[in-house]
Amino acid sequence: MNNNEKMKKVFLGGTCATSTWRTALIPMLNIDYFNPVTDDWTPECYQQELHERETCDYCLYTITTEMEGVYSIAEVADDSNKRPEKTVFCVLEEGFKPKQLRSLEAVAKMVVNNGGQYFKSLQEVADFLNRG
């Protein structure tokens, strides 16, 4: 990369709670990233998150069974409409019930139909982002 090229960057959205997917993915990345997880969530953190979603080259939303709310699903649907070329959706299927997986597959189909990307493993995500 020459001095005029900026390093690609990914927003690491999705399941927070006790999920460790970010810890597993970050060492696999050859691009920069923004991790929105913080111990002390403030209005400034929210504004920074909005800025990063707008300016990062990719917006990744990884969903795991540790998901406690559904806002990440709304974010991935919103981004797949507003910036489909940047939207990456990953569902780590282990532990989900069949009905939950069918619902997540329907979201994935929407993301892909809008022009986004869908993966079922962190390795696939890393391979895609590192190629970008």
Image (cartoon, rainbow, N blue to C red):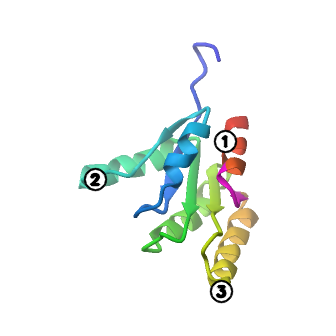
- What label sits on residue 39 in the rendered view? 2
2 and 1 marks in contact (CB < 8 Å): no
Q: Which residue shows up at 51% across the image and 70% down it?
A: 74
> Eyeballing the image, is 3 above or below 118?
above
Q: Which residue shows up at 38% across the image and 52% down it?
A: 37
What are the residue bounds of the magenta stretch?
116-122
Left or right? Give the position of 36 relative to 74: left
Q: Secondary structure at mark 2?
A: loop
Q: Which residue is mark 3?
A: 99
Q: Secondary structure at mark 3?
A: helix
Pointer 3 or 2: first along the chain:
2
Q: For the residue carrying disc 2, how many other residues have a C-alpha within 10 Å: few (<14), some (14-19), or many (20+)?
A: few
> Eyeballing the image, is 22 above or below 73?
above
Distance between the Cα atoms at labels 2 and 1? Answer: 27 Å
Q: Which residue is mark 1?
A: 129
Across and down, in percent, residue 43 comes to 25, 55
